[in-house]
Image (tube, helix red, strand yellow):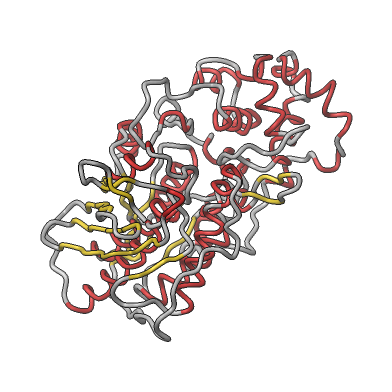
Amino acid sequence: MMTMDINNAWKFDRDAVKVFRFARCEFNAATGVAELAYQFDDSPEFVESVTIPGAPFALDDPRMASVNAALRLLHLITGVSYYKAAVPSTIEIDGTPIDQRTADFLQMVYENGLGEFAYRNGLNLRGQIKFPVGTSENYAASKQDLTHHALVAIGGGKDSLVSIETLRRIGIDQTVVWIGGSQLIRACAERTGLPMLNIGRTLSPLLFDINREGAWNGHIPVTAINSAILVLAAVVLGVDQVVFSNEKSASYGSMIEGTGEVNHQWSKGWAFEEAFAAYVQDHVATDLNYYSLLRPLSELAVARQFTRTDHYDQHFSSCNRNFHIMGERPVNRWCGVCPKCHFVFLALAPFMSKPRLVSIFGRNLLDDESQVGGYDALLEFQDHKPFECVGEGKESRAAMAALAQRPEWQADALVQRFKRVILPQLDPSELSIDSLLILDESEHRVPSEIWPRAKADWSIG
């Protein structure tokens, strides 16, 4: 339980916490503000807020019922940010209890979404996260007559820009959406020239207090939370599509010796998308489509599509050092030393002229011997794939093998090293880029009226 100090203020004791509680959630249509409240034992409420611009909203009873269902889903998923602080053995849900399907879905999200967190902290959460089941039936979704319009999540990187430009070319009305106050993302969104929606999210300040007092900390399934936020926004605004830009490669994690697979980007993968989208249509709105437009593509295929235009060359960034929970850090758009910078540079190199690529990053990362360790990890050479949103090792190996055959890259230090040290150990039959550019149509939820047009668009060039 929480202990008290001499000033009668509660003090967080991670190892003494017994219960994590979903206290309440509320949405105010007049202000567009959703409040999500959580507690540890008898602590004060940890209150997070999400603000959807455009209030006041006129919501009739059926729409409000759908909004409340989306709000409940958001409350339950966002709780992962707080639950992880102590990972107590007991979870309680105030108000209406949840059914077995919801409990199973949440257990999947928490266990897999906290996989890296658990690994790094030496915790075993498998089978330990149990949501209470108190009813046999939850809210059943109905058709909400939503407008044919897409809310497209934009993160400032290449992937979302490929989705945006694809949807533009095939004539889908869209609004680009981001969460939080990133000026870099705003500038990228403005560059699209499309309608924009900036959703506010404010975490409870108590979360930062207990982090300083020894709370467990680490990676959480951010995409799961952002997906739930955009689903709430879509129902409130009355539109029928929430579009993310997660590619096929996101479904594959890092293989850790003695541990197995740990996927840093699990909530960007197919397992999450499939389960979440089905849950939304069953419990929120039957005509609300959640999907990743890029699911059938590899990271290399996305990179190739990005190079079709130079419109965003000096505006986009996939470098995660530009984004931080406490705000943006004062660095260039590309730090040049993180796994995301390493991978994006390598993924673009086979499809982009060398001068253009170097002008984007400000330097040639493949001619810098200090980057050997970072690139070895991407290649899964004597190391595992980094805990980052990067492509599979086979993609990095195929890209590097392609560069090793091109005169303009052969003199670069890391390309030379790859050719001399690593390439002789690889199977040449597994190094074809062309085989990694083929669309995989077996796993995606792109609506049937959109998919053929998107597929045709990608076949150009």
Q: Quadrant of residue 288?
A: bottom left
Image x and y of residue 428, in percent = 86, 38
Q: Quadrant of residue 239?
A: bottom left
- Vertically, is 347 above or below 409? below
Looking at the rendering, in which quadrant would you find the C terminus? top right
Image x and y of residue 379, in percent = 72, 34
- Residue drawn where x is 30% and y is 42% of the image: 180
Res. 311 in view: no
Looking at the rendering, in which quadrant would you find the N terminus? bottom left
Q: Horizontally, is 345 left or right of 414 in the view? A: left
Q: Quadrant of residue 65?
A: bottom left
Residue at the far front in the pictured view? 6
Res. 100 in view: yes
- Residue drawn where x is 48% and y is 50% of the image: 245
Give the number of callouts: 0
Image x and y of residue 370, in percent = 65, 15
- Vertically, is 28 above or below 305? below
- Residue drawn where x is 44% and y is 41% of the image: 161
Image x and y of residue 335, in percent = 49, 22
- Residue drawn where x is 42% and y is 66% of the image: 91
- Vertically, is 111 above or below 278? above
